[in-house]
Image: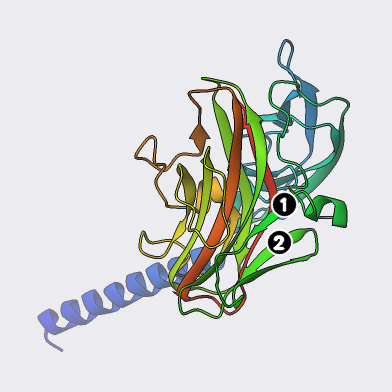
């Protein structure tokens, strides 16, 4: 046989063997090769921060942990393995840490934390913000904005839900709150909906104007959801400060901070409606109005 032919066949054979070896290595790596952690230790400690009211340091053990998620009762949020939290209100909290390790493996650990007293500067000024009882619900006044009564609020499962058949029907709820001149406050709440909407708004106001039935409230819009601005088109769940996209009238940015030029009474107003409103309604709970 010609020597050149023999050499060429040998070269082809060696190349085939090399390619086969490379493919085999790639397939082995795809099987994991031990890169996914078998378990992740999510244990952590909780310690009060000296000199800071109702402030706590959460420290996760670091071995095998790549990233962390924390939950203080309002849903998971991404955080650091050493995370500072502030709990202004007295109560018993379940703190949950989700530790994420190699290959996406996760582990969870929880700890109970008792906060003995409410922070006098940052306590929640909203009454009945969870709608948990009839007494809570009575703290809110319905602002009748739909002439036919087609849009309405309902209370269940420690929350309030706005329902609308569409066609621009809307409805509101509100309560009065006493504020101090030039003091900064933050407003927030948990909002959720399992389906999206079109031509829909959910807006939060903190104004001096007294709400009146049949009159669309427009005094000092602070935050909200708006399909025109790009949010609430699909399902959502979380704090309004995170999932909302409506700009603050005072700052011109997406912000939940407000302050007032006079000491006295303001009205926290939530109004919602739309043309093609979600069939499931928009649910709200844990409404907060706090000093900074």
The one of 131 and 80 positioned closer to us in this rendering:
131
Reply above or below: 72 against 117. Answer: below
Image-based side of 272 in relation to 157, left or right:
left
For image coordinates 88% across by 26% down, the residue present is 116
Q: Percent position (x, y) of residue 41?
A: 76, 44
Tell which circle, 2 or 1, labels the residue nearer the N-terminal end.
1
The one of 71 and 36 positioned closer to us in this rendering:
71
Q: Residue furthest top?
A: 51
Which residue is the site of mark 1?
A: 140
Q: Quadrant of the C terminus?
A: top right
Reply above or below: 61 against 142. Answer: above
Label 2 vs label 1, nearer the camera: 1
* Displayed quadrant of residue 164: bottom right
Which residue is the site of mark 2?
A: 160
Residue 64 seen by the camera? no
Q: Secondary structure at mark 1?
A: loop
For image coordinates 38% across by 67% down, the residue present is 22
Q: Percent position (x, y) of residue 66?
A: 59, 42
Q: Residues within 10 Å of mark 1 (few under 14, many from 20)?
A: many
Residue 171 seen by the camera? yes
How many numbered marks are there? 2
For image coordinates 81% across by 51% down, the residue present is 136
Image-based side of 58 in relation to 241, left or right:
right
């Amino acid at each position: 046989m010609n020597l050149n032919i023999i050499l060429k066949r040998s070269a082809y054979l060696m190349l085939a063997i090399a390619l086969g070896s490379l493919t085999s290595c790639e397939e082995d790596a795809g099987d994991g090769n031990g890169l996914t952690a078998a378990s992740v230790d999510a244990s952590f400690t909780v310690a009060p921060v000296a000199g800071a009211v109702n402030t706590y340091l959460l420290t996760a053990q670091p071995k095998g942990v790549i990233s962390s998620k924390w939950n203080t009762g309002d849903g998971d949020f991404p955080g650091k393995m050493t995370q500072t939290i502030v709990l202004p209100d007295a109560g018993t909290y379940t703190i949950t840490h989700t530790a994420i390790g190699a290959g996406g493996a996760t582990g969870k650990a929880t700890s109970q934390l008792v906060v003995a007293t409410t922070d006098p500067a940052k306590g929640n000024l909203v009454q009945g913000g969870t709608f948990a009882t009839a007494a809570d619900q009575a703290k809110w006044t319905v602002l009748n904005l739909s002439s036919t009564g087609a849009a309405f609020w309902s209370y269940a499962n420690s929350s309030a839900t706005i329902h609308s058949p569409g066609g621009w029907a809307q409805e509101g709820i509100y309560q009065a709150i006493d504020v101090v001149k030039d003091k900064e406050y933050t407003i927030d709440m948990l909002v959720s909906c399992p389906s999206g909407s079109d031509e829909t708004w959910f807006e939060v106001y903190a104004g001096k104007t007294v709400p009146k039935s049949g009159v669309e409230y427009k005094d000092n819009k602070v935050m909200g959801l708006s399909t025109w601005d790009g949010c609430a088109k699909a399902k959502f769940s979380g704090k309004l400060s995170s999932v909302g996209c409506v700009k603050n009238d005072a700052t011109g940015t997406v912000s939940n901070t407000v302050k007032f030029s006079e000491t006295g009474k303001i009205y926290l107003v939530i109004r919602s409606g739309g043309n093609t409103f979600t069939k499931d309604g928009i649910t709200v709970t844990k409404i907060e109005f706090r000093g900074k």
